[in-house]
Image: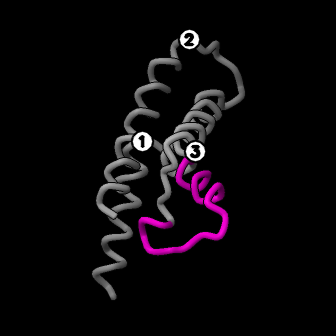
Amino acid sequence: MINNIVMIILLSVIVEYLVNVIKPLIPETDYPIPLIISLVIGIALAVVVKADILTAVGFNPEYLIISYIVTGLIVSGGSTAVHELIAKLRASREDL
């Protein structure tokens, strides 16, 4: 479980870094292009490395691709979003 969480944190840092590198190359528009890029990179990385947060926290998903996509969406939020999610998971575990 810890290895999966560390991998998800690392992926979120990579996504955040890549988006920050690409962002200056994007022209100003009314569309949230950096967000779309972040989503695409996050989902692509999660699928390629088979990052699976649902299995890591104890679920047994029937379709792993859905779990990879959910993980990619979480990773696309960047390191701050993943840190907040882990803090909430830790707090809910302490409540049990």
Residue 11 vertical placement versus 94 (above, below): above
Q: Position of residue 35 (x, y in %)?
A: 60, 35
- Marks 1 and 2, the one that precedes in the sequence: 1
Distance, label 3 to label 2, CA atoms, is: 26 Å
Q: Which sits earlier in the primary sequence, circle 3 or circle 1? A: 1
Q: Which of the two marks, 1 or 2, is nearer to us in this view?
A: 1
The residues bearing labels 1 and 2 have C-alpha atoms spaced at a distance of 21 Å
Which numbered dot is residue 12? 1
- Residue 58 x, y percent position in the rendering: 44, 74
Report the span colored magenta.
55-72
Q: Amino acid at mark 1?
A: Ser
Q: Of helix, strand and loop, which one carries label 1?
A: helix
* Dot 1 crowding, Cα within 10 Å, few <14, some 14–19, many 20+: many
Q: Pointer 3: what residue?
A: 47
Quadrant location of residue 21? top left
Does residue 28 appear left or right of residue 95 in this picture? right
* Mark 3 to mark 1 CA distance (whole Å): 14 Å
Between 47 and 80, the one lying in front of the other is 47
Secondary structure mostly seen in magenta is: helix
Give the amino acid at mark 2.
Leu
Give percent across and percent down for residue 26: 60, 15
Q: Secondary structure at mark 3?
A: helix
Q: Which mark is residue 25?
A: 2
* The label number, if any, that marks residue 35 in the structure image: none
Is 26 drawn above or below residue 67 in the view shown? above
The kind of residue on which mark 3 rests is Val
Q: Are marks 3 and 2 in contact (CB under 8 Å)?
A: no
Comparing marks 3 and 1, which lies closer to the viewer?
3
Residue drawn at (34%, 64%) of the image: 1
Q: Residue at x 58, y 44 (%)?
A: 47
